[in-house]
């Protein structure tokens, strides 16, 4: 699974609150620059779409320039431009798409739109340089929680997804209820280090053989816990209990998925893939199952241009490219 398109590919990612540009040559990540908006949105406790789009406008060209400088390449040496065009915040996506079109048109090189989740699904290859196919991928982020059967690059089947909130959203809103910082996943993880995960009984939804997820009830349970305990609440114990409730369900469903599909490989991708407890638990469980396990380095877990450049490279290898009419889409299913 080696990209034959060996010319430098510039990848742009602006689907939510990170502005990122990366340069990829084959498997070689020459640069991966990310400008985070976490500090901007912390005051609201979540991403405000209009503010995110304005921040992307300010950051996109400096981020591209920095990516080219780190890669020690000029724009004239870029052979193609890949950009996230679906799904995501339309205003945010439009900034990246507009920049990508302008750069590709100016250079006279191919433009390719990339599904945001496809970037995440292939991101584990940025560490291993190869992935076994087929495999099951657990995609976990602030907006997504899915189990996906990855037959090959460009061929995906959703096995199960959340019925309501994503795991990352449960971390964020749980952190807010506990008076912790933003983004919530990291804040909960750090607070949980000294906590007792068995102190507070929090629910694990959808018991049985389901491959789907539900986290809305968990958020409600954390709210009721905080209200009932008041000043008696142990924040470290509550954070540890919250993290355990989320991780337990994710691990259980992921292992069930590889048993159901009878594949022997699992990947963990997306922003929540940076969670140390989740990475450790899945690695241990896969070892017990006799299955291989792969997850990207933490810098490729959150939204980044490198994963978009890789997905774009593989699409270009298959002869796929897009026209100047490429549009931003708030919602879009994975290619099948």
Image (tube, rainbow, N blue to C red):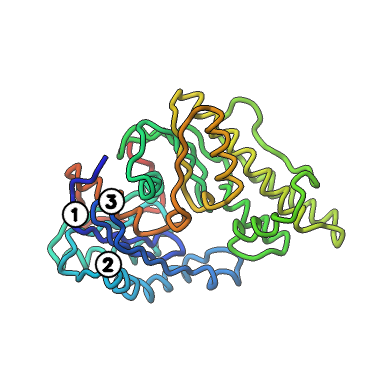
**Which residue position is annotated with label 3?**
27
Residue bearing the label numbered 2? 71
Kindly report the distance in space between the C-alpha atoms of the residues bearing marks 3 and 2: 14 Å
In-front residue for pair 153/4: 4
Residue sticking out furthest to the left: 108
Name the residue beneath numbered marker 1.
323
Q: Is residue 333 above or below residue 224?
A: above
Q: Pick whichever of labels 1 and 3 is earlier in the sequence.
A: 3
Q: Position of residue 127 (x, y in %)?
A: 38, 49
Determine the residue positioned at 69% across, 55% down: 193
Q: How many marks?
A: 3
Q: Nearer the viewer, residue 24 or 82?
A: 24
- Tag 3, which secondary structure? loop
Q: Is residue 65 left or right of residue 332?
A: left
Question: What crowding class fits label 3: few (fewer than 14 Cα within 10 Å), some (14-19), or many (20 or more)?
Answer: some
Above or below residue 309? Residue 45 is below
Instruction: For the residues labelled 2 and 1, say whether their Cβ atoms are less than 8 Å apart.
Output: no
When asked about the image quadrant of residue 175, the answer is: bottom right
Graded by Cα atoms within 10 Å as few (under 14), some (14 to 19) or many (20 or more), the crowding at tag 1 reads few
Label 2 or label 1, whichever lies nearer to me, is 2
**Residue 33 locus on image (x, y percent):** 37, 66
In the rendered view of the protein, which quadrant contains the C terminus?
top left
Q: Residues within 10 Å of mark 2 (few under 14, many from 20)?
A: some
Q: At 35% across and 49% down in the image, what residue appears?
A: 115
Percent from the top left, x then y, of residue 165?
Answer: 58, 47
Q: CA distance from mark 1 to mark 3?
A: 25 Å
Tell me how far mark 2 sits from mark 1, CA to CA.
Answer: 27 Å
Labels 3 and 2 touching (C-beta < 8 A): no
Relative height, residue 180 to residue 307 (above, below): below
């Amino acid at each position: 699974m080696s990209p034959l398109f060996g010319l430098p590919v510039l990848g742009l990612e602006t689907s939510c609150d990170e502005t990122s540009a990366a340069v990829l040559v084959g498997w070689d990540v020459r640069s991966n620059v990310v400008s985070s908006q976490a500090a901007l949105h912390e005051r609201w406790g979540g991403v405000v779409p209009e503010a995110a789009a304005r921040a992307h406008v300010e950051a996109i060209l400096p981020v591209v320039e920095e990516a080219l400088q780190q890669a020690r390449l000029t724009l004239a040496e870029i052979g193609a431009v890949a950009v996230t065009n679906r799904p995501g915040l339309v205003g945010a996506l439009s900034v990246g798409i507009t920049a990508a079109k302008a750069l590709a048109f100016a250079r006279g090189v191919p433009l390719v739109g990339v599904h945001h989740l496809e970037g995440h699904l292939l991101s584990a290859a940025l560490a291993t340089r190869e992935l076994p196919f087929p495999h099951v991928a657990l995609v976990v982020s602030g907006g997504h929680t899915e189990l996906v059967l990855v037959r090959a690059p460009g061929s995906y089947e959703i096995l199960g997804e959340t019925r309501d909130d994503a795991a990352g959203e449960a971390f964020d809103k749980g952190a807010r209820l506990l008076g912790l910082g933003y983004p919530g996943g990291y804040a909960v993880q750090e607070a949980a280090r000294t906590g007792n995960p068995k102190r507070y009984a929090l629910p694990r939804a959808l018991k049985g053989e389901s491959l789907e997820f539900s986290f809305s009830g968990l958020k409600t349970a954390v709210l009721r816990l905080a209200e009932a305990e008041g000043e008696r609440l142990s924040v470290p114990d509550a954070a540890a209990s919250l993290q355990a409730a989320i991780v337990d369900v994710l691990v259980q469903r992921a292992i069930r998925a590889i048993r159901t599909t009878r594949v022997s490989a699992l990947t963990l991708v997306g922003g929540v893939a940076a969670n140390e407890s989740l990475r450790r638990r899945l690695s241990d469980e896969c070892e017990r199952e006799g299955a291989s396990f792969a997850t990207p380095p933490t810098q490729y877990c959150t939204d980044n241009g490198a994963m978009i450049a890789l997905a774009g490279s593989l699409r270009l290898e298959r002869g796929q490219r897009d026209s100047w009419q490429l549009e931003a889409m708030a919602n879009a299913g994975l290619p099948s």
